[in-house]
Amino acid sequence: MFDLTGMTALVTGASGGIGSSIARCLAAQGARLALSGSNSSKLRSFREELNDEYRHPNGTHVDITCDLSNATQVEELVPAALDTFGQLDILVNNAGITRDNLAMRMKDEEWDAVIRINLEAAFRLMRAASRPMMKARFGRIVTITSVVGATGNPGQMNYAAAKAGLVGMTKSFAQEVASRGITANCVAPGFIRTAMTEVLPDAQKEALNARIPIGRMGEGGDIGAAVVYLASKEAGYVTGQTLHVNGGMAMFA
Ligand code: NAP
């Protein structure tokens, strides 16, 4: 089950905390990956690690540098993955940034950067991926949102707007392409243990864990497993949905 052998996947933000776990989980199931990010040296060293860990029979995993704040570069990303693989089965919109500030202090640039990278780039990539996926009559698009898109969070008007926007965008897109064998879904992480959360003082970590019924922060692999499922052939009857992976800290109908 959930065998991705023969499938190709483009993952944005692949060198980040969650993105690298998603990439490892997809590669472990047999997919061949195009890893994307804006920092080419970070990306290259992760690509080398991944090729050592999960050698692919049909060729190596590749990296494609792309600054998602630059519309021209974003438009070139899916064609670059297609040039390499000849097909694109899975797109994972994972890259995301925060530029937190209370509403009254939030600068236009903070709003714009988050909307451009977290929301607009995902739109451009979904639009570009839909063409080859429609031709192939198969595709899986998985977009990483956040619990904050559903609950809101003080200091994160821009981030919450982008994450909630991705959910609406995914539902619309899913309805447009469902008849062509393409599904589009979101995964909404809660608190995930990354380099950023590791440096928090123990007392603060304990306070966070106390808000989570499962009693711990999530791991990157918890998100990777959800992405593998939604990317698989077995999830072909699931579309337009948001899978919340948050240890129960927020439960939605
Ligand atoms: P992270 O470690 O900061 O990684 C972010 C990734 O996004 C990096 O690979 C980075 O690559 C890429 N990125 C940032 N700006 C970019 C740009 N302009 N162009 C291209 N790539 C760019 O973040 P994370 O914690 O793994 O988060 C991954 C996703 O999960 C995000 O969408 C985030 O909103 C979501 N999320 C995270 C949590 C959590 O607890 N960590 C919770 C809920 C949702 P470069 O460094 O190469 O640019």
Image: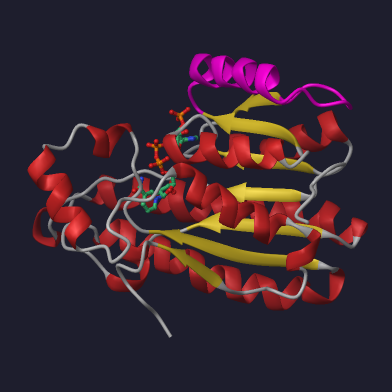
User: Considering depth in this image, is 212 or 230 the residue closer to the camera?
Assistant: 212
Residue extent of the magenta highlight:
38-61
Q: In which quarter of the image is residue 145?
A: bottom left
Classify 158 as above or below 88: below
Q: Which residue lies furthest to the bottom in this view?
A: 253
| Residue ID at (14%, 61%) | 103
| Residue ID at (51%, 14%) | 41
Residue 178 at what x, y percent from top left?
A: 77, 74
Classify 30 as above or below 239: above
User: Considering depth in this image, is 203 or 167 the residue closer to the camera?
Assistant: 203
* Quarter of the render that holds ligand 1: top left
Task: Decide if residue 223 is on the left or right side of residue 174.
Answer: left
Query: Quadrant of the image for the C terminus?
Result: bottom left
Residue 39 at what x, y percent from top left?
A: 48, 22
| Residue ID at (78%, 65%) | 234
| Residue 155 in view | yes
| Residue ID at (59%, 75%) | 171
Residue 192 at what x, y percent from top left?
A: 35, 48
Task: Decide if residue 1 is on the left or right side of residue 159.
Answer: right
Q: Quadrant of residue 164?
A: bottom left
